[in-house]
């Protein structure tokens, strides 16, 4: 089985529900409407922006940022987005754009990668008074086998702890949930593509066992909530 690593192959936001229109409508609505107070007319830094598709949708729903800087080594944004005057695209890791300033920094399911790469130095690389982080929770509803759950849980970054270590102040926390309905076969395809970072360093045998577990223990159609925890925190 060929190995696949979304960090190299740029697949993350394109597969399963993560590539669906409905998923981006959900996130676009969150960014353009529910969190508009943080984003409207602001200079936004999106660290680990991926396809940037959340922003395509947020613009479509009326968001007008002053500037939007998208940083990702695997950045793959639409032509529409790259043509917007507010956008600056950096196809590189955040440590290569040290000293970037903005009103608000966003990490959507990316802070664990950045923290793995540069630790708390990430707060030197990103100079903002306000940070909005979205990360998967410890208790995810994703249909993971006990073996994969055992690998997943210790890999979850304790965001509140790094916020405190860096002397930032938590302003609020809340969770958002996207209702997923997906064929078991499509879920297995996502697993084969190692879309969850916990699978990146698993060997082929582990992956095959995970897929067998899903085939044996999960229904034809999987239904669960993709719940993401949001932490909003401030520079002291
Ligand atoms: C799970 S994906 C999330 C993508 C996007 N935020 C979204 O929600 O659609 C994580 C992203 O973090 C990016 N990433 C990994 N290391 C990074 C680094 N050191 N600096 C910036 N981005 C990084 C990866 O390339 C990947 O696109």
Image (cartoon, rainbow, N blue to C red):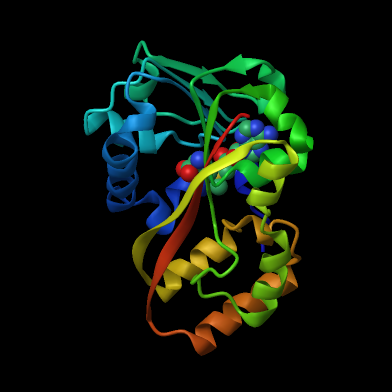
Left or right, 145 with reference to 203: left
Q: Residue furthest bottom?
A: 216
Q: Quadrant of residue 114?
A: top right
As drawn, 200 above or below 104: below
Residue 28 position within the rendered picture, expressed as x and y whole percent measured from the top left: 31, 40
Quadrant, the C terminus: top right
Report if residue 10 is visible in the image: no
Frontmost residue, 131 versus 85 = 131
As drawn, 169 above or below 5: above
The residue that appears at 37% across and 28% down in the rendered structure is: 39
The residue that appears at 72% across and 41% down in the rendered structure is: 115
Left or right, 79 with reference to 115: left
Quadrant, the N terminus: bottom right
Report if residue 55 is visible in the image: yes
Q: Quadrant of ligand 1?
A: top right
The residue that appears at 40% across and 72% down in the rendered structure is: 224
Residue 157 position within the rendered picture, expressed as x and y whole percent measured from the top left: 68, 53
Q: How many marks?
A: 0
């Amino acid at each position: 089985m060929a190995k696949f690593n979304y960090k190299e192959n740029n697949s993350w936001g394109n597969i399963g529900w993560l590539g669906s229109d409905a998923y981006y409508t959900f996130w676009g609505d969150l960014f353009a409407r529910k969190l508009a107070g943080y984003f409207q007319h602001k200079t936004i830094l999106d660290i680990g922006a991926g396809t940037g598709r959340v922003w395509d949708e947020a613009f479509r729903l009326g968001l007008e940022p002053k500037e939007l800087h998208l940083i990702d080594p695997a950045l793959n944004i639409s032509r529409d987005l790259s043509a917007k005057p507010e956008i600056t695209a950096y196809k590189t890791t955040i440590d290569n754009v040290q000293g970037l300033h903005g009103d608000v920094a966003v990490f959507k399911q990316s802070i664990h990668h950045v923290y793995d790469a540069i630790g708390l130095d990430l707060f030197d690389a990103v100079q903002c008074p306000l940070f909005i982080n979205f990360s998967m929770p410890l208790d995810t509803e994703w249909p993971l086998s006990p073996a994969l759950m055992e690998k997943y849980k210790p890999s979850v970054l304790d965001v509140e702890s790094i916020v405190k270590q860096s002397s930032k102040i938590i302003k609020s926390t809340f969770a958002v949930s996207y209702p997923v309905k997906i064929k078991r076969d499509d879920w297995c395809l996502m697993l084969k593509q190692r879309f969850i970072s916990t699978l990146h360093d698993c060997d082929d045998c582990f992956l095959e066992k995970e897929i067998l577990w899903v085939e044996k223990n999960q229904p034809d159609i999987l239904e669960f909530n993709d719940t993401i925890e949001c932490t909003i925190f401030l520079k002291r």
